[in-house]
Image (cartoon, rainbow, N blue to C red):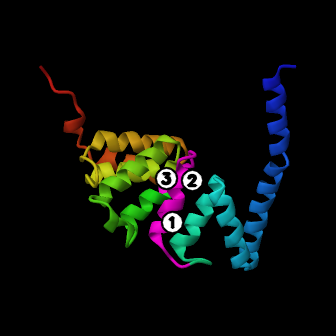
Amino acid sequence: MPIKWVASLVVLFALLPNLPANASSLDDALKALDAGNSPKAVEVLLKLANEGNPLAQFRLGSLYYHGQSVTEDENMAIYWWKKSAASGNAEAMYQIAHAYLFGSSAAKNVADPDREAAIWYFQAASAGHAEAAYTLGLLFLAGKGVVEDRNEAMRWFRSAASKGHIEARKAMETADKSVSPVSRAKPRR
C-alpha cells in the first residue's frame, strides 16, 4: 500500500471518533437550550462554532440576534451567520438579509442596508430558499435595494411559488390582475 494511502487512512480513522462527538455535542447543546441550561449550551455552541460547525454557527447567531442566553447583539449575530452562510447555509443567508432590512443596528454598519439585504436575499434565493425568493420579488416590485423591475419580481415570485410558497402565488395572481388587458396585448405593427 502506498504511503499516501496509509497516511490518509490514519488521518481518517483519527477523525472518525470526533464526528459523532461533534454531532452529539451539538445535540446536547440544543437539548440544554430547550431545558433552560443556557450557559452550558452557549459554551458548547461557541466551541463548536469556533471549530467551524455551520449549524452551531447559525444557532449561535440566532441566540445573539434574539438575545436568548446571551446579550442581544445584531453584529455578533451577523458575524456568526456569515460564517454559517460561507458553508452554504441558505437560512443563514436569509437571516443576514432580514437583519439588514429590519434590524436596528446592523443597518448602520453598511452604506446601503436595502442593497445589502437584496444581495443576501439573492444569495439565499439562489440557494433555494423560498421565503428569500419571495422577499426578493417584493424588493424588485418596490425598487428597494434594487432597480424596480416587475418582470424580475415575477421571476422570483415564480421561483418561490414553485417551492410551494403560498404568498408568492398570491403575489403573482395580484400582479397579473393589475395588468390591464390592453397592456397584455402585443402591439400591432
- Residue 60 sits in quarter: bottom right
| Crowd tier of the residue under label 1, counting other residues whose Cα lies within 10 Å: few below 14, some 14–19, many 20 or above | many
Q: Which residues are magenta?
A: 71-94
1 or 2: tag closer to the N-terminus: 1
Residue receiving disc 2: 84
In this rendering, the answer to whether 3 lies above or below 9 is above
Q: Which mark is residue 48?
A: none
Helix, strand or loop under label 1: helix
Separation of residues labelled 3 and 2 (CA atoms): 8 Å
Question: Which residue type does callout 3 highlight?
Answer: Met
- Which callout, 3 or 2, points to the residue nearer the camera? 2
Separation of residues labelled 1 and 2 (CA atoms): 11 Å
- Give the total of numbered labels: 3
Separation of residues labelled 3 and 1 (CA atoms): 12 Å
Q: Residue at x 53, y 43 (%)?
A: 128
In this rendering, the answer to whether 52 lies above or below 15 is below
Q: Is residue 42 magenta?
A: no
Q: Is residue 166 visible?
A: no
Residue receiving disc 3: 93
The kind of secondary structure the magenta stretch mainly shows is helix
Nearest the eye: 10 or 140? 10
Furthest residue in direction front, as rendered: 3
Q: Position of residue 37 (x, y in %)?
A: 74, 79
